[in-house]
Amino acid sequence: MTDSSPPILRINALTKTFDDFTALHGINLNVRDGEFLAIVGPSGSGKTTLIRILVGMDEPSDGAVWLRGTRIDVVPANKRPTCMVFQSLALFPHRSVGQNIEFPLKLRGVAPAERKARALELLDTLRLPRDYYSKRIQQCSGGEKQRVALARALAFDPEILFFDEPLSALDYRLRKTLEKELKDLHRRTGKTFIYITHSLEEAMVMSDRIAIMKAGRFEQIAPAEEIYARPVSKFVAEFMGEVNFFDLVKGAAPGVALSAAASAALAGQTGTLTIRPESLRKLTAEGVADLSFEGIVTAEYLLGSRIQYRMTLATGQEMIVEVLRENAVEGGIGAALRVGCDLSAAHLIAEAADAAA
């Protein structure tokens, strides 16, 4: 689907209030056909409220939800062409894998032979052996249960699959495996996936776009790379990972030495300058960069192939630097460190800087 094509799902001015608390503040969102959209945000940001409205478990206080041009927020959940994969999976523990997968088809009156054929087809799709059809759910591993839940969700060929943090209870290695399998499943099926998670890492690995929520509103909706490199607010910048902030007031920032070219480019501008730790490189005494910083290393952390340093500038401000192990700082903690980056590696958030407030 191109950006100009009609969206498969359109959320228009959606509001949800609980007594005197507003959980969603008139939010708008268009979801593309075949897109993998991840919705992330801290606890209490409105993610769960939104997903419950989208799947029909709650009603909005105001606004509307449209699926392919048909309003669905007024349609009962069991009449919508959508399906939900819950965090708890909600599988029937005393039934077989096949019976679990066939359950939504049975509710729709599909004949037994057709149900079984569809279940076996989905076992193939989810890369589970066909003899699992008769296996009890209680005999399945955590990863196998996840695949069965996905197969059941796909059983009646829904327009959209919704996911409510389905991987959160799994161990790290299994989560990483299933992240890749979900992304591959999305590619193979061409379905529209809307995935709620508190894990930014999950969202970045799997999704086409990320929608970041804060206090019942969308802060930014864009591909992960764009949000990471060009956040619209300090909240988004911090949510997307570690970052260094510098208050820029009329083209100058305490603790930041600017080259002539950088000074000219930033002249008169005020806002928050953001620099990711991995964008910085060590500079020699004679080295030059558009933006450079000098300080003392106060802590170091080994991150596998990389080392992260915390350094304190002469202004007292702390900043984080991340380099490859072969570029480790000689002397470690207590050593003088000079780092820099190109202006293109920095991003200016158009918000009033604290120093200008």
Image (tube, rainbow, N blue to C red):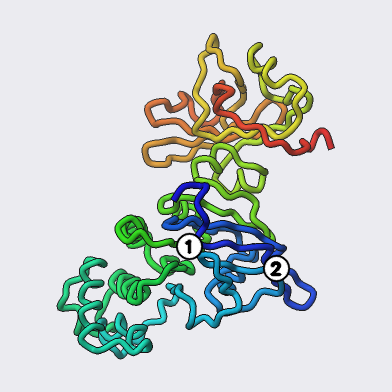
Question: 288 above or below 104?
Answer: above
* Residue 46, numbered circle: none
Percent of width and height locating residue 142 = 32, 72
Identify which amino acid the numbered label 1 is placed on.
Ile
Query: In this rendering, would 338 be left or right of 263?
Result: left
Q: Which residue is drawn at 55% across and 77% down?
A: 56
Kindly indicate the quadrant of the structure image that contains residue 147. bottom left
Q: Residue at x 30, y 75 (%)?
A: 148
Q: Which of 113 and 166 is in front in this view?
A: 113
Q: Which of 82 and 215 is in front in this view?
A: 82
Percent of width and height locating residue 138 = 29, 84
Question: Can residue 95 be seen in the rendering of this structure?
Answer: yes
| Other residues around mark 2 within 10 Å, as few (<14) / some (14–19) / many (≥20) | many
Identify which amino acid the numbered label 2 is placed on.
Thr
Q: Residue at x 49, y 36 (%)?
A: 308
Question: 262 above or below 102?
Answer: above
Q: Is mark 1 on a helix, strand or loop?
A: strand
First of labels 1, 2 by sequence position: 2
Mark pair 1, 2: CA separation: 19 Å
Question: 350 above or below 62?
Answer: above
Q: What element carries label 2?
A: strand
Question: Can residue 339 be seen in the rendering of this structure?
Answer: no
Which corner quadrant holds the C terminus? top right
| Other residues around mark 1 within 10 Å, as few (<14) / some (14–19) / many (≥20) | many
Q: Which residue is drawn at 20% across and 68% down?
A: 124
* Residue 15, numbered circle: 2
Query: In this rendering, would 136 be left or right of 168?
Result: left
* Residue 194, numbered circle: 1
Q: Which of 199 and 297 is in front in this view?
A: 199
Kindly indicate the quadrant of the structure image that contains residue 266. top right
Percent of width and height locating residue 184 = 31, 56
Percent of width and height locating residue 340 = 56, 22
